[in-house]
Amino acid sequence: MKKILFLLLFVSNISFSQTAQEIGQILNDAIFYCDRYITPASDASIYQASSGWVTSPKKRKLWEVTLGFNNNLFFVPKSDREFEIKNSDLSFFSIYDANWAPVSSAIVPTALGTNQQYNLNGYIGGNQVYLQTPQGVNSEQVFYSHFTGSVGLWYGTELIVKYSPVTKLKSGNYQVYGYGLKHNIDQYFKSLIQKKINMSGLICYSNENISFGFIAPASNNGIELGINEINGLVDTWQFQFNVSKEYKRFEIMGGIIANKSDIKYKFTGDVSPGQAIPFQEVFNEKIKEIYKTKTNYLGEVSCRYKINKVFLQSTFAFGKFVNSNFAVQYEF
């Protein structure tokens, strides 16, 4: 959000005691909006980080190394690109369209939505407080690249790491990193080895960090309130079972994924010194109300093709969302 005349409680002729109720209403409205705005992006980030961990469930030789470059494409469903707000949902602000005509409700974008904006307006002690609703990434697909690496350990165990540099999105950024251990199961069953059927179990951890521009505040006396950006911080533990069948140069794989994610949010931004009220701290304390823990179940299908020591692999994960991944790997 930009061009905001926000919280005139900092102006000397308005006292905190006179505006405490209005401040509480602003906080409630902002947290309500934050929840609806960024939650779809937090859910999507979990799906983006969930697939593509296992290149193959087959047993690796000790110290065998695989490096991969992955291109991930996430498809944003329409239902998660927008949401409706009504004046009855808000305790302080009222909704206006782009031309400042009052409306009773509006369909506004989530962080995964379009760049359409509405205006929100209210008053503290007769002083106007207004803002524009934040924009989304304005794309039906979200693309990012990441690197993977693995090394074979003892007893059919494999260490896997995943890392992506910060990916620039319109109105935001995305980054993921993580590590896991995969253990081969078919090594205990000679009949599966003979049929070239591979099985493995995986446990992994990933950290996803998404951020979007929220409010770039500029009060009439130039005070910076430190809520320019909202960050979604996601810690995910994942359990996965995969089975594959080899056909000459091809390997066809299927998997079942279950993960549990702790989702936290934080406001960041420039803070003017000497504020009477530490507004950024107040917001970050209030936003704890929308911290969440979510459990997801996904299916995964994959096809891998061998060209000497180079492998080409496409992977699709599906559940609430659909996520695709294409990788080029090299085995040392």
Image (tube, rainbow, N blue to C red):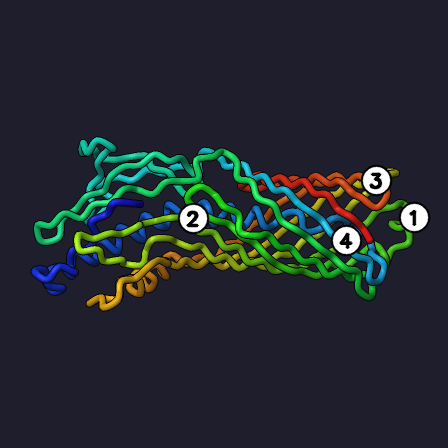
N-term mark: 2 or 4 = 2
N-term mark: 4 or 3 = 4
Amino acid type for the residue under numbered disc 1:
Gln
N-term mark: 1 or 4 = 4
Using the numbered discs, state the Cα–Cα distance from disc 4 to disc 3 in whole angstroms.
14 Å
Q: Where is residue 148 in the image (x, y as percent from the top left)?
A: 68, 52
Query: For the residues carrying marks 3 and 2, which lies nearer the camera in this image?
Result: 3
N-term mark: 3 or 2 = 2
| Secondary structure type for disc 2 | helix
Using the numbered discs, state the Cα–Cα distance from disc 1 to disc 3 in whole angstroms.
23 Å
Task: Name the quarter where the N terminus is drawn.
Answer: top left
Using the numbered discs, state the Cα–Cα distance from disc 1 to disc 2 in whole angstroms.
47 Å
Using the numbered discs, state the Cα–Cα distance from disc 2 to disc 4 in whole angstroms.
35 Å
Q: In which quarter of the image is residue 8?
A: bottom left
Please determine whether, in this image, residue 328 is positioned above or below residue 266: above
| Label 1–label 2 contact, CB within 8 A | no
Amino acid type for the residue under numbered disc 3:
Ile
Residue at screen point 57% across, 46% down: 48
Query: For the residues carrying marks 2 and 4, which lies nearer the camera in this image?
Result: 4
| Label 2–label 4 contact, CB within 8 A | no
Residue to which mark 3 is pinned: 307
Query: Which numbered tag is attached to residue 39?
Result: 2
| Label 1–label 4 contact, CB within 8 A | no
